[in-house]
Amino acid sequence: MVNLTIDGIKVSVPKGSTILQAAKEVGIKIPTLCYHPDQSVKANCRVCVCEVEGNRLLQAACSMPVTEGMVVKTRSPKVIEARKTILELILSNHPQECLTCARNQNCELQELAEEYSIREYAFEHKVRGLAKDTSTPSIVRDPDKCILCRRCIDACSVTQSVYALGIENRGHHAMVVPSMGKDLIDSPCVMCGQCIHACPVGAITEREQIDEFLAAVADPDKIVVTQIAPAVRLAIAEEVGMKPGEMPMDVFVAGLRQIGFDYVLHTNFTADLTIIEEGNELLKRLKEGGVLPMFTSCSPGWINFCETYYPDLLDHLSTCKSPQQMFGALVKTYWAEKMGIDPAKIYSVSIMPCTAKKYEASRPEMQDSGYRDVDLVLTTREIGRLFRMSGIDFTKLEGSSFDSWMGKYTGAAVIFGATGGVMEAALRTVYEVVTGQELKDVNFTAVRGMEGIKEAEVDLNGTVVKVAVAHGLSNARKLMDQVRAGESPYHFIEIMACPGGCIGGGGQPITKSNAQRQVRIDAIYVEDENCEIRKSHENPEVKILYDEFLHEPLGHKSHELLHTHYHP
Ligand code: HC1
């Protein structure tokens, strides 16, 4: 242990700790901008500077290791003055758009400007005048707002191994740009949106489509129907000041009706359906010697990554569409027929934790219903804004149920939202289908949690099936390289593009650490435990769908509506 004194307080911390970590131990908050708890130290913004006795220059607390007997001052007049100057310099070319910025009241720079009483521009204010990049359906970059902290580059390169963002030029002319200076759409960007969470300001945001939603609600010829992704309910609570998972589902449904949805259905319904189709596809491949390992196909950021970096492995992907797109295809066919509604009038809106889902819905092949299957994708953050805009008091709102035929779901669908959830849901069903025996303990804990790559084995009547789970694309890359080298021991691999799975998706409430992701994951498993039915094949509405419409898994109708192909 190393002993030091910070602002007169004695503290002992493990060797190798930084001043920032030591200060946290004794409850001293040092401001940061380029620092991120799950990334490597960059020490380029300097806003965390402190006085260290014996050093003439101020030192960056995020990178300076503690030494025995060190004496640190984190709040001396000299330190405060330096931090104010650093903030004033950053603000000197930052747009004055706080009121209209997507990160208003959720911006680390704005917070610091307030904390440090910045009341005027100390230097000449001159915005660089760089063009916005609106080239993708998912993400918008505003380089003028970039403060060059490089956290987005770290998220894109280290966490995701996508390498879509880099730094161009030096000094005053430095800029974060998509690779080769292209627009984002022409870069390897997979639209996962992890850069949005990493960005401390509003330089990278989702493509906001709230106005399109409001126009649809106002159109008397449109019947606005929604589906809610598994990871949304846990996190929507955070958007209205509650803890993850704290908003009851029926209150959430009631809130959605308040903001104008005519019908509220659930992506969880098609998550259960995915398990039936994907489980049968796996069993078919195992029986007939098909391409193995089979990869899950529900995470669109992962699909984009596979198409970009592993086009030679596309036939390993399950042909199942994601639950979002299965829902889209069914709502304008099966559900419209059941409800006696003209499918041309249905405006299908999905509420997703994911920015890549906006891109997925826009893919030209996603119109097997005869219409665009999903008309609009709103993220959890956008729904949060709509809720706040509508002034709903969720503590007083009476709950409401999902509408019929595509609103029922099981615990297996709920856990889709966490890394390992799709695998666990599949194992719950595949085990019972193959062995014909009841699964006594449905909890496959080996595939749960934040470890980057997890694996498990299941004995299916003498056939041992080996599975692996990866979340975050750098972890996925390790498994893919193994498959490409012909060295993969697995039969089935689940990959989710975002760390933690969809609970950490690019459209979720701004997520500042993996610890925050873990809290959401914990809430997901509580919800699963509380579900009366926890296996997808026992979903009563899915059974009706097969009886009345699809007739059998992997059948003709399924292939027409629920399966797809990929683009090298
Ligand atoms: Fe996901 Fe999925 S779990 S991809 O993470 O398979 O986005 O929540 O909706 O489609 O069901 C996301 C979440 C989501 C799909 C499902």
Image (tube, grey):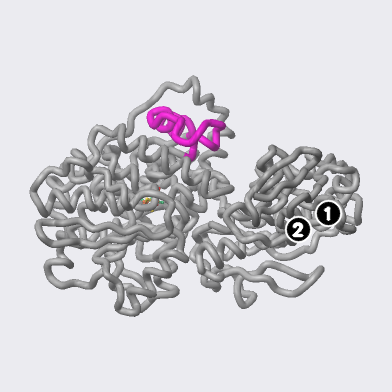
Q: Which residue is mark 2?
A: 45
Which residue is at 64% across, 49% downward? 1
Residue 494 in the image: state x and y as whole percent.
Answer: 33, 59
Crowd class of label 2 (few under 14; some 14 to 19; many from 20; radius 10 Å): some
Q: Amino acid at mark 1?
A: Ile
* Span of residues in magenta: 235-259
Task: Answer whether residue 528 is magenta in the image.
Answer: no
Mark 1 residue's CB less than 8 Å from ligand 1: no
Residue 49 in the image: state x and y as whole percent.
Answer: 80, 52
Crowd class of label 1 (few under 14; some 14 to 19; many from 20; radius 10 Å): some
Which residue is at 20% across, 61% downward? 465
265 to the left or right of 132: left
Task: Answer whether residue 236 is magenta in the image.
Answer: yes
Separation of residues labelled 2 and 1 (CA atoms): 8 Å
Which residue is at 40% across, 49% downward? 449
Q: Secondary structure at mark 1?
A: helix
In this view, 530 is above or below 548:
above
**Which secondary structure type mostly characterizes the magenta part of the structure?**
helix
* Residue 86's disc number: 1
Residue 196 position by quadrant: bottom right
Asked if the residues shown at circle 2 and circle 1 are in contact, with their CB atoms under 8 angstroms apart, the answer is: yes
Which of pointers 2 and 1 lies earlier in the amino acid sequence?
A: 2
**Quarter of the image that includes the C terminus:** bottom left
Q: Secondary structure at mark 2?
A: loop
Residue 409 visible: yes
